[in-house]
Image (tube, helix red, strand yellow):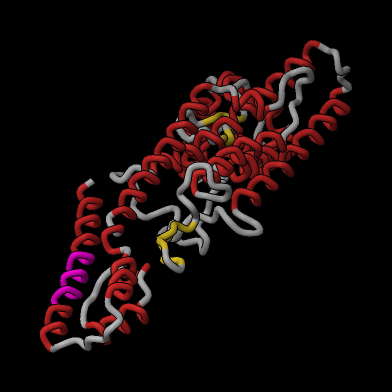
């Protein structure tokens, strides 16, 4: 029995020493952690995170176990902390939902998405419901919800509209919204600008087709700078629509210009927008130069094949349409082609084909070198 009592005494002594060591400075640690901000923002990603320290969670668990053991001499600071466990749990749960919603709503919101959600696909910028339109609706809904929460908070805090503290709170919310909208627009502009860089872009974002329409080559969409619905018009409207998402959020502070107006006047955003449009113009000029390379072969699609072969089979010569008509007026007599005429015509056709292929290959090679 003496050994058993001695062992119990030693264990209790060790337990008390551990407890005393644990309680040293515990009150100051609790107060220091409780005085820190519950929400913090990452400076690089601009995302929010919950700042409820793990030390506080650990202390709450320790106190719960000590109370179950009916331990005496628990510091008053820890008992006070434990008495508010339900309150802390409610706040933490609510803030976790708020942080998740914020980080998923606006800052990580993608205004442009691929048509079939694959990285190698073209951006979804045309159609009945583009990704930009869907994102705009999401921001509009979020803006309405924020104003509903502001009204609810005003009621809960019993704040008068002209209270200095309430106006400071509205100014803080207004500045936060402005920063969020600025980041959305800037990130969207930077995404477009980065993917216009041949060194950075992995895949094309937009599609412009060079097609033969009856007797002329045309671009779809048009590359004429003043053409309604053309590429330049399309891109300019897209950039304007990015600005317009800010109009979906009302300002908490009365008397200020709309978020859209203030953002449109921001010099840094305006410079990025102009650079994007400048890149579009440069690409359009390059495409028009590429189209001009085919002008030497325009006779292949301008001339009537039926007329060309009919004339060749009756007169044995091949010429442009204006020359054909002049020859017909000078000489109405038919002169079927000889074997030598056929021999001359085949190499000429092959030469046209080779020149055309070399033109395309030369242009593609130049693009790869850029």
Left or right: where does residue 139 sit relative to residue 185?
A: right
Camera-side residue of 30 and 162: 162
Q: Quadrant of residue 214?
A: bottom left
Q: Main secondary structure of the magenta part?
A: helix
Q: Residue drawn 77% across and 39% down?
A: 145
In the picture shown, does residue 32 fall above or below 236?
A: above
Would residue 58 be seen by someone viewing this image from the given angle?
no
Residue 361, x across and y down, in percent = 21, 61
Residue 138, x across and y down, in percent = 68, 47
Would residue 328 be seen by someone viewing this image from the given angle?
yes
The tally of labels here is: 0
In the picture shown, does residue 342 fall above or below 132?
A: below
- The segment highlighted magenta reads 347-357
Left or right: where does residue 261 sit relative to residue 347?
A: right
Residue 308, x across and y down, in percent = 31, 78
Residue 51, x across and y down, in percent = 57, 32
In the picture shown, does residue 71 fall above or below 338?
A: above
Q: Quadrant of residue 164?
A: top right
Left or right: where does residue 212 sit relative to residue 124?
A: left
- Magenta includes 349? yes
């Amino acid at each position: 029995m003496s050994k058993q009592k001695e062992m119990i005494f030693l264990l209790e002594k060790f337990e008390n020493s551990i407890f005393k060591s644990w309680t040293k400075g515990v009150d100051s640690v609790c107060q220091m952690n409780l005085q820190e901000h519950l929400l913090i923002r990452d400076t690089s990603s601009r995302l929010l995170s919950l700042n409820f320290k793990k030390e506080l969670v650990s202390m709450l668990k320790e106190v719960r176990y000590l109370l179950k053991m009916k331990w005496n001499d628990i510091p008053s600071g820890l008992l006070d902390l434990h008495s508010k466990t339900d309150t802390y749990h409610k706040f933490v749960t609510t803030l976790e939902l708020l942080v998740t919603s914020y980080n998923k709503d606006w800052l990580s919101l993608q205004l442009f998405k691929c048509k079939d959600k694959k990285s190698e696909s073209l951006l979804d910028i045309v159609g009945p419901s583009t990704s930009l339109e869907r994102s705009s609706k999401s921001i509009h809904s979020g803006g309405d919800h924020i104003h509903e929460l502001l009204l609810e908070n005003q009621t809960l805090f019993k704040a008068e509209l002209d209270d200095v503290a309430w106006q400071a709170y509205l100014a803080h919310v207004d500045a936060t919204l402005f920063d969020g909208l600025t980041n959305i627009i800037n990130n969207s502009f930077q995404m477009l600008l980065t993917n216009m860089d041949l060194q950075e872009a992995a895949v094309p974002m937009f599609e412009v087709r060079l097609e033969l329409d009856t007797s002329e080559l045309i671009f779809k969409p048009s590359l004429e700078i003043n053409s309604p619905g053309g590429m330049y018009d399309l891109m300019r409207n897209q950039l304007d629509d990015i600005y317009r998402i800010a109009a979906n959020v009302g300002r908490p502070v009365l008397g200020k210009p709309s978020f859209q107006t203030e953002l449109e006047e921001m010099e840094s955003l305006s410079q990025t927008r102009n650079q994007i449009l400048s890149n579009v113009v440069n690409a359009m000029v390059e495409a028009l130069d590429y189209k001009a390379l085919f002008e030497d072969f325009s006779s292949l699609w301008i001339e009537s094949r039926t007329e060309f072969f009919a004339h060749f089979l009756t007169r044995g010569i091949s010429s442009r349409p204006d020359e054909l008509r002049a020859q017909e007026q000078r000489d109405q007599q038919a002169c079927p082609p000889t074997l030598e005429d056929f021999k001359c015509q085949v190499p000429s056709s092959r030469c046209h084909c080779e020149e055309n292929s070399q033109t395309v290959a030369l242009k593609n090679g130049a693009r790869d070198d850029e």
